[in-house]
Image: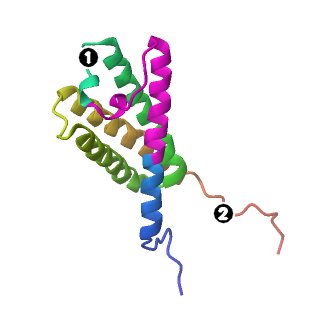
Amino acid sequence: MASHFRSYIWDPVLIVCQIVLMQCIYYSFLGLWLAGVDSLVQSGRSLDQIFSYELLGFATVQGRLSMMAFILNSLTCALGLWFFIRRGKQCLDFTVTVHFFHMIGCWIYNAHLPAALSWWLVNVACMALMAVIGEYLCMRTELRAIPVNTGPKSNL
């Protein structure tokens, strides 16, 4: 039986575990970035910073700093894609899935779909950053040279 290069078996349990892991990475690092931003401006922490779309805006300092936290979070989530997903082809899929579940969470939290243009712009920009950087890191790892023969050569 011939082996196939990078053959994969459909494993729904692995996929669901990776989705849950990426959601955990997304919200835990977003919480850390927002806590860091809150310590800079001495403001209180709340779930509104994560789920309320009205706080993300260009008009206030808190809104701009929250946007910065979301953008920094997309960079750390790209590292999560690199460490745990490891496939360039799957980076866009997992990125869209993470942001889709975040949109569902915001929808449930606010009782309606986010209506602010700034929320949509920030999330689309974060999706693009997370997908592109994650795919770049994964592809860089995938395209690394594979050593063919590292043992000592013998004269035959």
Q: Hey, what amino acid is under mark 1? A: Phe
State which region is magenta.
24-52
Residue 61 in view here: yes
Give the quadrant of residue 48.
Answer: top left
What distance separates the C-alpha of mark 2 from that of mark 1? 54 Å
**Quadrant, the C terminus:** bottom right
Residue 58 image label: 1
Q: Hey, what amino acid is under mark 2? A: Val
Give the quadrant of residue 60.
Answer: top left
**Quadrant, the N terminus:** bottom right
Percent x, y for residue 34? 44, 26
* Crowd around label 1: few <14 · some 14–19 · many ≥20 (10 Å): few
Percent x, y for residue 6? 50, 68
Residue 140 in view here: no
The numbered mark, 2 or 1, whose residue comes first in the sequence reads: 1
Q: Determine which residue is flagged by label 2.
A: 148
Q: Residue at x 39, y 23 (%)?
A: 68
Q: Residue at x 42, y 55 (%)?
A: 19
Magenta-span inclusion, residue 38 = yes
Front residue (pair 31, 149): 31
Residue 69 image label: none
Percent x, y for residue 64? 33, 18
